[in-house]
Image (cartoon, rainbow, N blue to C red):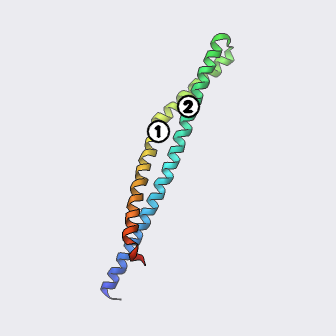
Amino acid sequence: MSEKEEIQADREKFIGQWGKGLRIRHIAHSLCFARYNALNRIIGLTATILAALVSTAVIVSLKSGTDTEKAVAGDFSVLAALFAAANTFLKLGELASKHSRAVAAFGQLSGNWNFQNAGKRM
């Protein structure tokens, strides 16, 4: 194999590895986006449901609540606060948004790469 052919083979190998890396990063960001988006929804929905239960339990316990009912309302209140704090602290929606933008960028880059190199791989 001549030096020119070796350089061409190395170039094609590099381009192939680069394209594979693009696909891997695109898939990884897609998976991260899906996971953080789902966690954001789960934690946010749980916090909302717990807050609704707290308000209902407080209203019920104020009228004719036993100590147990008041304790349950207090427990739900603490849980709702924990879930809301976790959602705020973890910023899962923000992470999901960043991964979504990365998915779009890698998708566009990968699409451009595929278009430019389509004839070269044949």
Disc with the residue nearer the chain's start (1 vs 2): 2
The image shows residue 64, relative to residue 82, as above or below, that is: above
Name the element at disc 1.
helix
Mark 2 residue type: Ala
The image shows residue 103, relative to residue 87, as above or below, that is: below
Residue at point 36% right, 77% down? 10
Judged from this view, the residue extending furthest toward the bottom is 1
Spot occupied by residue 45 in the image (x, y as percentages of width and height) = 56, 34
Which is nearer the eye, 74 or 17?
17
Mark 1 residue type: Leu
Mark 2 residue crowding within 10 angstroms, few (<14) / some (14–19) / many (20+): many
- Residue 20 picture quarter: bottom left
Name the element at disc 2.
helix
Quadrant of the snapshot with the N terminus: bottom left
Spot occupied by residue 62 in the image (x, y as percentages of width and height) = 62, 12
Query: In this image, 95 relative to 78: left or right?
Result: left
Query: In this image, 68 relative to 96: left or right?
Result: right
Q: CA distance from mark 1 to mark 2?
A: 14 Å
Residue at point 44% right, 59% down? 25
Please tell me how many numbered marks the rendered image carries: 2
Residue at point 49% right, 31% down? 85
Spot occupied by residue 81 in the image (x, y as percentages of width and height) = 53, 27
Judged from this view, the residue extending furthest toward the top is 63
Judged from this view, the residue extending furthest toward the left is 4
Quadrant of the snapshot with the C terminus: bottom left
The image shows residue 83, relative to residue 38, as above or below, that is: above
Residue at point 62% right, 16% down? 59
- Residue 60 picture quarter: top right
- The label shown at residue 47 is 2
Q: Nearer the viewer, mark 1 or mark 2?
A: 2
Question: Which residue is the site of mark 1?
Answer: 90
